[in-house]
Image (cartoon, rainbow, N blue to C red):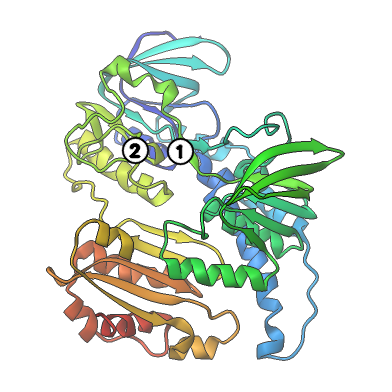
Amino acid sequence: MAATNEKVDVVVIGMGPGGESLAGELAAEGLSVVGVEARLVGGECPYFGCVPSKMMIRAGNAVAEAQRIPALAGSAQVASDFSVVAERIRSEATDNWDDAVAAKRFTDKGGRLVRGTGRLVGPKKVAVTTNDGDELTFSARRAVVLNPGTDPAVPSIPGLEGTPFWTNREAMQAEKAPKSLIILGGGPVAVELGQAFARFGTKVTLVVRGPRLLSKEEPEASEILGRVFHSEGIKVLYNSTITAVAHANSAFKVEVTRAGGAVKKLSASMLLVAAGRTPALAGLDLPAAGITSGEDAGGGQAAPDAPSVDSHMQLAKGLYLIGDAAGLGPFTHMSMYQANIATGHILGQDRGAAESHAVPRVTFTDPEVGAVGLNEQQAREAGLDIRVGTAQVPSSTRGWIHKAGNEGFIKVVEDSKTGVLVGASSMGPHGGEVLSALALAVHARIPVKTLGTMIYAYPTFHRAIAEAVAALE
């Protein structure tokens, strides 16, 4: 057994995308780095999130695109087979949920991987309960980096506990598409997986607490996605909540209470809980390092339940918090961005200060929904004097050419006082790719005047940006 109470340069708790990146770079620089991970090196993204889900979505989109052939190119017969993408997820994305390659990638750089759960026992001191039951203690000379990530949020619903319901993790391990699926939630995970499974023949019903899908996006996106779902046979129960669950004979019985108190009974072969994420902060024992939730360390705009970090992602000197649990954006790209800044700070390099005014996000439905910065409502609530411009993708030249599956829009939100965009949305075919130009504009605070006079390639989807800018009012 390894010696306890060791002195090392850096300890990283949580080897998700940001933690793995940071730990690997520091180890490659010659620092003694201990990476602590109880589950899979690489975290949620490559095994249960971004990568396998987008493989599933890509497969479902191929089925849908083939079904559009009659409107564009003749005739086709399509027979979907979920086992093809299920096997691809196992063999290409996750190695059957084995992280040996990722672990070796880290240790080959000189890092030491400890399989276990870490917690703070001092400002720069970490105790680890290994997966084998041993207890190790590490004192960090330079830094402790916390990257605990999040777990699927599971609400307390009578009858739910003990049933074989899915979260996104179980859904990614499915070998067959269920015949029917009830989804609790209307956010990105719910709509992405709902549409993907529906395209493989699953009868899908979403139970959404509020009045629309994707409540954090522009209302126009919610309206279009609702219409698309209706056209694809996906049912959405708005202003509804699941109030009771039962499971018997390989089927779920679900009680749904609608606004006003009406009760509806549903049944399906599977239930997917996609009700958000919960930061995995509880087990870290932040108070042991003098940190309390919500304490202002002098910088970032953290979520209400997250402790605040400074511009280099520090909670306190030598103690960093990165990734989803930092509350600045639950995205792999945000975790990697924060990891780069923290890595530079630990090495004494200037890699800039963390900013969160231009965080891009994409919901990979068909059509895709991309957004960056503030939406119109957020900008108004922030007290900004704004102008808003919108262009409809179907009426653009590329949208007209595209025809089947061309639903979408581009919307820009300008701070009229500064003349720059504070937010934008891009929904449509390749909406996430079109977003890149808008993300650059918001991030670099490029004057709207420049956006209105630049040259846009013809005929492209991103050319609609010029139309949206011209429509500012």
Left or right side of 225 for 173: right
Q: The residue tagged with tag 1: helix, strand or loop?
A: loop
Q: Examine the rendered structure and indicate whether residue 247 appears above or below residue 118.
A: below
Residue 102 in the image: state x and y as whole percent.
51, 39
Give the structural element (helix, strand or loop) at label 2: helix
Splitting the image into 4 quarters, where does residue 470 fall? bottom left
Q: Residue at x 58, y 14 (%)?
A: 132
Q: Residue 430, labelled with which disc?
A: none
Task: Determine whether, in the image, residue 295 is placed left or right of residue 430.
Answer: left
Residue 375 appears anywhere in the view: no
Which of the marked residues, 1 or 2, is nearer the chain's N terminus? 1
- Image quarter in which the C terminus is found: bottom left
Q: Residue at x 69, y 38 (%)?
A: 244
Q: CA distance from mark 1 to mark 2?
A: 13 Å
Instruction: Classify residue 23 as left or right of residue 9.
Output: right
Residue closer to the observer: 342 or 177: 177
> Residue placed farthest to the right in the image?
249
Residue type of the residue flagged with mark 1: Gly
User: Up-down: is 122 above or below 297?
Assistant: above
| Image spot of residue 286 (x, y percent) | 33, 21
Residue at 59% of width from left, 32% of height from top?
Answer: 156
At label 1, counting other C-alpha atoms closer than 10 Å, the crowd grade (few under 14, some 14-19, many 20 or more) is: many
Q: Which residue is mark 1?
A: 16
Question: Dot 2: few (<14), some (14–19), or many (≥20) neighbours within 10 Å?
Answer: many
Residue placed under numbered mark 2 in the picture:
326
Camera-nearest residue between 32 and 349: 349
Q: Quadrant of residue 273?
A: top right
Relative to 3, residue 39 above or below: below
State the image coordinates of residue 126 (x, y, percent, origin top left).
36, 17
362 vs 470, nearest the viewer: 470
